[in-house]
Image (cartoon, rainbow, N blue to C red):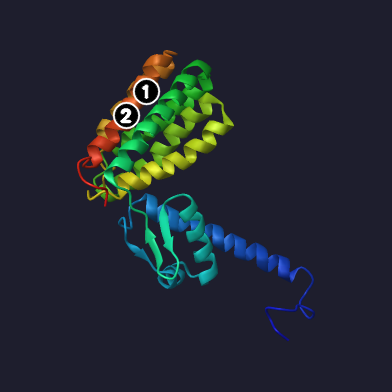
């Protein structure tokens, strides 16, 4: 009997369990590779080997290939038929265009949040900001950069929650993935390790939200987003 074709002698539900297991492995592979890309483990343009990833993640090739297809749809990797897969690359103009749009969108979110936030929302944001402040004194730049990326996403996700718009939250998730990816595939080592200036920006945004000052929240958020890319990339040269 063909073990992959007919399943007459297999227990009832075996095929369904196998399918669910494969889907779960694909999700895990997708999340792990995505985290590596967003943390800058791979350089822009670097070749990604399905075989190597399969060994590293201890899964078969199929979940890895499915993960790479999903990451390709998100613009994080490029799949070239008959050639293979590489980490995506973007030129300097594309990077500038992205962050101009991203800053505008996040500014609009902050303005909405200023008018809709609750006291409970602010308390949650204050707690996240305090956790980010602790990172300033962490000695290991790699640990500091990774921890900041995670906490930073929490900080901005809380502001999205204040804006109370499911559509905005969905769009912003993908935009933040692209932002982390572009920043962490610069030529700088641990570009997110400098926490103090970013924490200062967060505090200005937080104060504007406390004051329900939508215009100030918008401006400080836009400055924050544009300041990040200015500090971490050389706009005169193509992104690596």
Q: How far apart are marks 2 and 1 (CA)?
A: 9 Å
Is residue 15 left or right of 25 when viewed as pictured?
right
- Which quadrant would the N terminus be assigned to in this image? bottom right
Question: At 50% across and 59% down in the image, what residue appears?
Answer: 69
Which image quadrant for residue 95? top left
Question: At 37% across and 61% down in the image, what residue appears?
Answer: 86
Instruction: Name the residue that disc number 2 marks.
Output: 224
Which SS class for mark 1?
helix
Which residue occupies the foreground of this view, 89 or 152?
89
Which residue occupies the foreground of this view, 22 or 202?
22
Find residue 3 and name its label.
Answer: none
Is residue 6 left or right of 123 when viewed as pictured?
right
- Indicate which disc, 2 or 1, sits on the residue closer to the N terminus: 1
Question: At 44% across and 58% down in the image, what residue appears?
Answer: 33
Which residue occupies the foreground of this view, 115 or 147?
115
Question: At 24% across and 47% down in the image, what residue appears?
Answer: 238
Residue 136: % across, % down: 27, 37
Q: Mark 2 or 1, which is nearer the eye? A: 2
Assess whether mark 1 and mark 2 are in contact (beta carbons under 8 angstroms). yes
Vertically, is 171 above or below 34?
Answer: above
Q: Label 2: how many residues lie within 10 Å, few (<14), some (14-19) or many (20+)?
A: many
**Count of numbered badges drawn on the protein:** 2
Is residue 101 left or right of 228 when viewed as pictured?
right
Residue 176: % across, % down: 42, 40
Residue 84: % across, % down: 41, 67
Vertically, is 108 above or below 37?
Answer: above
Q: Label 1: how many residues lie within 10 Å, few (<14), some (14-19) or many (20+)?
A: many
Instruction: Name the residue that disc number 1 marks.
Output: 205
Which residue occupies the foreground of this view, 145 or 188?
188
Which SS class for mark 2?
helix
Which image quadrant for residue 164? top right
């Amino acid at each position: 009997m063909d073990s992959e074709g007919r399943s007459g002698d297999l227990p009832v539900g075996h095929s369904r369990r196998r399918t669910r297991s494969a889907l779960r492995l694909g999700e895990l592979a997708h999340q792990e590779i995505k985290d590596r890309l967003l943390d800058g483990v791979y350089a822009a343009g670097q070749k990604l080997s399905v075989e190597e990833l399969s060994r590293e993640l201890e899964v078969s090739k199929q979940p890895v290939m499915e993960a790479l297809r999903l990451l390709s749809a998100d613009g994080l990797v490029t799949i070239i038929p008959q050639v293979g897969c590489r980490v995506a690359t973007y030129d300097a103009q594309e990077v500038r265009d992205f962050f101009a749009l991203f800053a505008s969108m996040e500014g609009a979110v902050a303005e909405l949040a200023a008018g809709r936030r609750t006291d409970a929302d602010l308390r949650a944001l204050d707690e996240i900001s305090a956790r980010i402040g602790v990172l300033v004194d962490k000695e290991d730049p790699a640990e500091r950069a990774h921890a900041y990326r995670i906490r930073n996403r929490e900080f901005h996700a809380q502001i999205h929650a204040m804006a109370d718009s499911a559509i905005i939250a969905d769009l912003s998730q993908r935009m933040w993935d692209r932002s982390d990816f572009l920043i962490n595939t610069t030529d700088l080592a641990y570009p997110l390790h400098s926490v103090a200036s970013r924490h200062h920006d967060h505090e200005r945004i937080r104060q504007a939200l406390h004051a329900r000052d939508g215009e100030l929240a918008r401006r400080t958020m836009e400055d924050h987003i544009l300041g990040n890319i200015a500090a971490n990339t050389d706009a005169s040269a193509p992104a690596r």
